[in-house]
Image: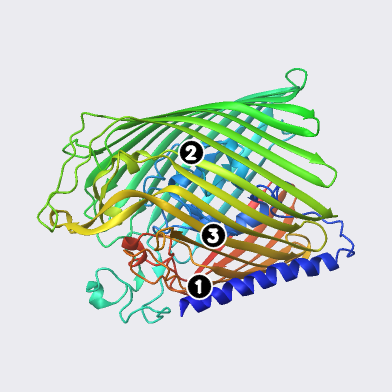
Amino acid sequence: MYCKQKLFFDKRLLGFLFSGLCISSASAQTPNLEITATGSQEATQSILTPTKVLQGDELLNKLGTTLGATLANELGVSATGYGAGSSRPVIRGLEGSRVQILQNGLSVGDVSNISQDHAVGNNMQNAHQVEILRGAAALLYGSGSSGGLVNVVNDRILTNLPDRPTGAINTSYETVNNGRAGSLEVDGAIGSVAVHIDTAINNANNYRIPGSSTQSQGEPIGGWTVPPEGNGGNNYTGKLPNTFSNQNNLGVGVSYIGQNGYTGVSVERLNNNYGIPTPEGGSINQSQNRYDLQHQTRDPFAGFSSFKFNAANSNYNHTEFTNAGEAAALWKNIANEARFELAHNPLLGWKGTFGAQVTASSLNATEVGTGSYAIVPPTKTNSNALFWIEEGKWNSLQGNLGLRYNNVAQKPNLGTELETQVMNTGADTPSITLQNRNFNLMSYSAGGLWNFMQGHGVGVAYTVSQRAPSAQELYSYGAHESTATFDIGNPNLNKETSHNLEFNIQRTSGLLRGKASIYANRFNNYIYVYYTGQSVPDVENFSVVVAQQAAATIKGIEGELTYNWREQGLGGRVFGDASQGSFDAGGNLPLQPAPRLGAEIAHQRNGWLTNATYIYSYQQNRLASWEQGPAPSYNLLNAGISYTEKIQQVNWTVYLNMKNLLNEQIRYATTPMAVRLYAPQPGRSFMVGLRGTF
């Protein structure tokens, strides 16, 4: 049944995307309106390296407590769902180490890529902009981002002098979890020195979920609750345990602004305490100190337009607690990163950037009490990289090239004693031998665009991305509570290589616009965890999983049509995306997102802004052989209304955001079984708030 639905989805999506683009071509004579955008802008090179920039009212309306929740409904982007405290973006079926997370262009420095229950180390309340990069643009920042790269910009280090004090204040209340949030930021200047201060707090209790009476497609009687005998065989009703989240942060930035550039420093303290909604329960108390340095010189010498230098130090740690409140494990990660970029002036139609990047991190996870390692032995990771990106334009033709070389060294503590366990078969868990590994990575990208008529283009892009296995993929050996697994790494893993080919068509002018992409991403040595079918009785019968590699392919399509979108007056948008990953030898990749179709409508006039979004997510039963399912389909309806009035020098906005108005049980197929089968996303929610900018 699902295969028929999927085929119908693909045909319908292809039909409305390409027929809509043809219609938009026919309406090219529609006069443009002289109006100012109020939300996100697509980067000019997006047809070559698809880039989404989320900012302004659009970011405020979609803002969640986590990065994953904020981006969950963007084109080609879904999310993991570990309650309200931890959620990372999933881009075109890829997540974890394949989707790098940055803050102001440098690695966020956390351990969220190791496990989905580890929260991303940034606070979304102070974010000014969220960028999604792919292709050549992603090669500026890292190798191995085969899914893409997400950069969160908070403008903590100011690059221009404010002519007067400016800032923003925001406060809100949410019904589904008794959530209370507030944030404040202020920018000012003293002579040639610019100062920025920001702080935010977001406290939320356990959230309410829809009752078990609202059965989703394919859901058994009694719901998906694990264990099935829990709560009389029914899902929890009311509030779901261990879904609370308490965050706060403080950031300060100071920069000197000169005629030819700026130099600035910033410091941030982040605290995050949140629950882990698994049958075993538990919580994580996270903290991070981060220090940043940024410098730019414009026109440093003849032939070059800019020199930039960035550096950051992150001192991250979190403590994992049992459901009884006892400390179980302590994780620490110290990360240092520095990079420079040198941009040259146009030469023979080309302009570009080249530079170097150095990263060093030290990961240490220990069990509280015994002091032995927790899941991953202490590991030091060093990375040295060179990169070069070029863009050219000649009349109706555009092109870009990207090249990045990385050397990555993984050095575990070779003296760590790995503790074997007895499996249900009576045999010991497979042993591994720790060893140092070194990887040479070469990634490159090339793309071209033909503007066959004003505002219309077709393009092609080809990207090869190589990734070194992460520390947990190489060296994991132990029980993992949040996924209910006993993880065993593979120190002999080879580097992972992806070959991504993408075709694009886009209309970028006029009231009616559109874009569509078809892509295929083929992997050599795709790294994944394989469920062996065995378990460890002494560790709560956790399933034994081992790291393996195989050839795999992810194919997908995504696109949208918009009418006057994010402009004054009435605007609308229809969109859809679908991707499916499979092993070349047969079988499906795990944790793949379900196909989606959606529509949005918005109206802005005289200070009023109203919007509504509807998304239908198909049932996902194309699961890996060891996954339980299917992940049920769902209907998501969100809406919002706000009114802005300027009183003296302050623009005050009162707003109401409504999420999951249909009170549907939503379970992301991208979330591991231990949580997906047990914990749905929040039910119907109303958020009321007041925001002021000056």
- Camera-nearest residue between 342 and 227: 342
Q: Nearer the viewer, mark 3 or mark 2?
A: 3
Which tag, 1 or 2, sits closer to the chain's start? 2
Indicate left or right for 483 with 618 as reference: left
**Residue hosting label 3:** 555
Q: Is residue 544 visible?
A: yes
- Residue 186 sits above or below residue 193 on the image: below
Q: Nearer the viewer, mark 1 or mark 3?
A: 3
Indicate left or right for 14 with 429 as reference: right
Which tag, 3 or 2, sits closer to the chain's start? 2
- Looking at the rendered structure, the kind of residue marked 3 is Lys
- Looking at the rendered structure, the kind of residue marked 1 is Tyr
Q: Is there CB contact under 8 Å for labels 1 and 2?
A: no
- Looking at the rendered structure, the kind of residue marked 2 is Val
**Residue hosting label 1:** 618
Could you tell me residue 681's position as x and y percent?
43, 65
Q: Nearer the viewer, mark 1 or mark 2?
A: 1
- How packed mark 2 is, by other alpha carbons closer than 10 Å (few <14, some 14-19, many 20 or more), is many
Label 3 – label 2 distance at C-alpha: 29 Å
Q: Which secondary structure, mark 2? A: loop
For the point 72% across and 37% down, which residue is it?
A: 391
**Residue hosting label 2:** 108
Q: Is residue 294 visible?
A: no
